[in-house]
Image: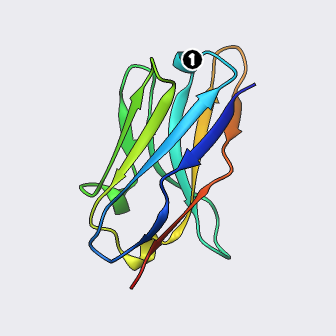
Amino acid sequence: QVQLVESGGGLVQPGGSLRLSCSASGSIFSFYTMGWYRQAPGKQRELVATIASGGTTNYSDFVKGRFTISRNNTKSAVFLQMNNLKPEDTAVYYCNAVRTVIKRIAYWGQGTQVTGST
């Protein structure tokens, strides 16, 4: 079992920045690939970025050059630095943890609201 708790969301002006944090507990953090996903009302949840245990990252095209994912395995935390926010970035952002050893298991946090608006 992994418990994930997101924080750092809020209301920000277009062009502004936010840093999301996700704190993990309940398992060995280094076993998991971590990710950030987002979901706007009426839309499917979509990938924002992932980071593997060793640090390999993957970004969706719509956030490349604006968002940066990072992790601290000692602190069992993953972060998403969000720069140059746009109104279309407005969504609930979810932290995700995936383990693929033996069997694929995925966990999700409760989400944190990000609103890029005046």
Residue projecting furthest to the bottom = 118
Q: Where 86 sits versus 10, above or below?
A: below
Residue, x 63% and y 24% (percent of image)? 99
Colour basis: rainbow
Residue 115 in the figure: left or right of residue 82: right
- The quadrant in which residue 63 appears is bottom left
- The quadrant in which residue 61 appears is bottom left
Report crowding for label 1: few under 14, some 14 to 19, many 20 or more residues within 10 A (C-alpha).
Answer: some
Q: Where 110 sits versus 117, above or below?
A: above
Disc 1: which residue: 31
Residue, x 70% and y 28% (percent of image)? 2
Q: Where 8 sits versus 95, above or below?
A: below
- Image coordinates of residue 24 in percent, x first then y, are 60, 30
Residue, x 45% and y 17% (percent of image)? 74
The foreground one among 104 and 74 is 74
Residue, x 47% and y 53% (percent of image)? 8
Residue projecting furthest to the right = 1
Position of the C terminus, as image quadrant, is bottom left
Residue 5 in the figure: left or right of residue 85: right
Position of the N terminus, as image quadrant, is top right
Q: Secondary structure at mark 1?
A: helix
- The quadrant in which residue 13 appears is bottom left
- Image coordinates of residue 87 in percent, x first then y, are 41, 78
Q: Where 81 sits versus 75, above or below?
A: below
Residue 100 in the figure: left or right of residue 14: right
Number of marks present in the image shown: 1
- Image coordinates of residue 20 in percent, x first then y, are 45, 50
- Image coordinates of residue 30 in percent, x first then y, are 52, 17
Q: Please, what is the three-letter code of the amino acid marked with disc 1?
A: Phe
